[in-house]
Image: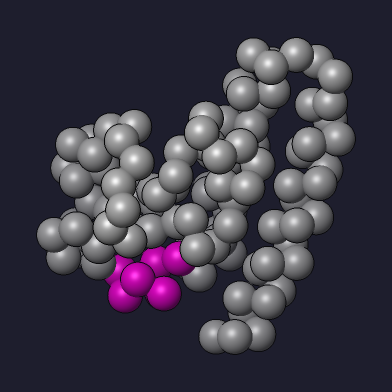
Amino acid sequence: MILEKIKLGQFILHYNQRALSKAKNKGENYLTRYLRGVASNFIKRQDVRSFIMNRDNFKCRFCGSTDNLTIDHIIPVVINGIESNHPDNFRVLCKSCNFHRGMAVDEWK
């Protein structure tokens, strides 16, 4: 598990650096949209999803449900930018809890 987290961390660093260099000097609105797209594509990667789901035992971290699971950014990309693509900023939530959470930044992890 530790080796997986190290490999994922190295990949995230490379992925974030590439994304940031592509969006450089194109304006704040473009950068925000671009980062949201990068974050969305990143979460869709099977290795990332598998790592986060396994870490959270395939359960919603709010209600414990095992149905309709999604990967959630604890601190949204629009607030934290490229740093949002870090394993410690992801958690598993069911669709219902994720919907009710919305864009709020909560302290519970």
Tell me the quarter of the image containing the C terminus: bottom left
Q: Residue at x 68, y 67 (%)?
A: 9
- Residue farthest toward the front in the current orientation of the protein: 107
Residue 44 covered by magenta stretch: no
Residue 19 spot, x, y in % from top left: 77, 38
Q: How is the image coloured?
A: one colour
Q: In this rendering, does residue 68 appear at all? A: no
Find residue 105 and report its image quarter. top left
Tell me the quarter of the image containing the N terminus: bottom right
- Residue farthest toward the bottom in the current orientation of the protein: 2
- 89 displayed left or right of 14: left
- 8 displayed left or right of 97: right
Which region is colored magenta? 52-58
Q: Residue at x 61, y 76 (%)?
A: 5
Q: Residue at x 40, y 49 (%)?
A: 74
Residue 78 spot, x, y in % from top left: 52, 30
| In the foreground, 105 or 33 | 105
Find residue 26 and report its image quarter. top right
Residue 53 covered by magenta stretch: yes
- 99 displayed left or right of 49: left
Residue 90 spot, x, y in % from top left: 45, 56
Q: Is residue 82 above or below residue 25?
A: below
Q: Count the labels in the image.
A: 0
| In the foreground, 11 or 26 | 26
- 65 displayed left or right of 40: left
Residue 88 spot, x, y in % from top left: 50, 63
Q: Residue at x 50, y 70 (%)?
A: 51
Q: In this rendering, does residue 56 appear at all? A: yes
